[in-house]
Amino acid sequence: MKLTATFHGGTRYDIVSGQHRVITDQPVEDGGQDAGMGSVELFVGSVASCVAYFVGQFCARHHIAREGLSVDADWAMAEQPHRVGRIDIAIHLPHRIPAELKERLLKVAHGCTVHQSIANALTVSIRLNPHAPPGPHSSRIPQ
C-alpha cells in the first residue's frame, strides 16, 4: 500500500491515496493558511475514525442503530521527544446498550487497526531519495 504527501506551498501538503485527496496545513498562527487539518489532528482523527468504524460494525452485527454514533478524541502533547503523549477517546451512542454488550463493544473499539498499530511496537523507516537515479554526487560506480 502506498500514499504520497506532496508540497503545495507554505505549510500545505496534500496526501493522495488512490483517488482520494486529503489537504493538510497548519493554522494561521503557525504560519499556515488553515486549508486543512494539521498532521497531528489527522493522526488523532485516524484513531477516532477507526474506533468509530469498528464500533459501527459491532453495532451493525448486533442490530444496534448507528444513527447518532460519534467518537470524540482529546489529546495532549508530550516532550522529549515532541509527540502526541495521550489520546482520550469517548464513544457516544444515543441510546443504551445491554450491559453484556458494553465490555464486548469496548474490546472491539480497542482492537481497531490504527489503535493497535500505535499500541504495539511500530516500525517506521525514513529514507532520503530511496529510488533516485544516480546523480553527479553519487557514490555509485558507472558500469
Image (cartoon, rainbow, N blue to C red):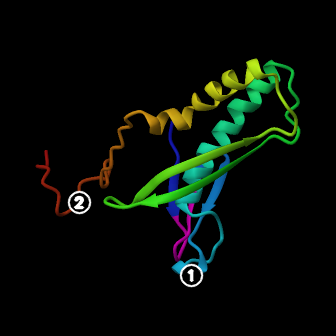
Secondary element at image label 1: helix
Whole-percent x, y for residue 91 in the image: 72, 41
The tag on residue 13 is none
Amino acid, disc 2: Gly
Q: CA distance from mark 2 to mark 1?
A: 39 Å
From this viewpoint, is residue 17 visible?
no
N-term mark: 2 or 1: 1
Residue under label 2? 135
Identify the residue shown where x is 79% and y is 26%. Answer: 59
- Which image quadrant for residue 111? top right
Image-based side of 4 in relation to 124, left or right:
right
In the rendered structure, find residue 29 and report the number of the disc placed on it: 1
Q: Quadrant of the C terminus?
A: top left
SS at mark 2 in the image: loop
Looking at the image, do the residues carrying marks 2 and 1 touch, with CB atoms under 8 Å apart? Answer: no
Q: Nearer the viewer, residue 132 or 143?
A: 132
Relative to 44, say whether 14 is above or below: below
Q: Residue at x 81, y 22 (%)?
A: 98
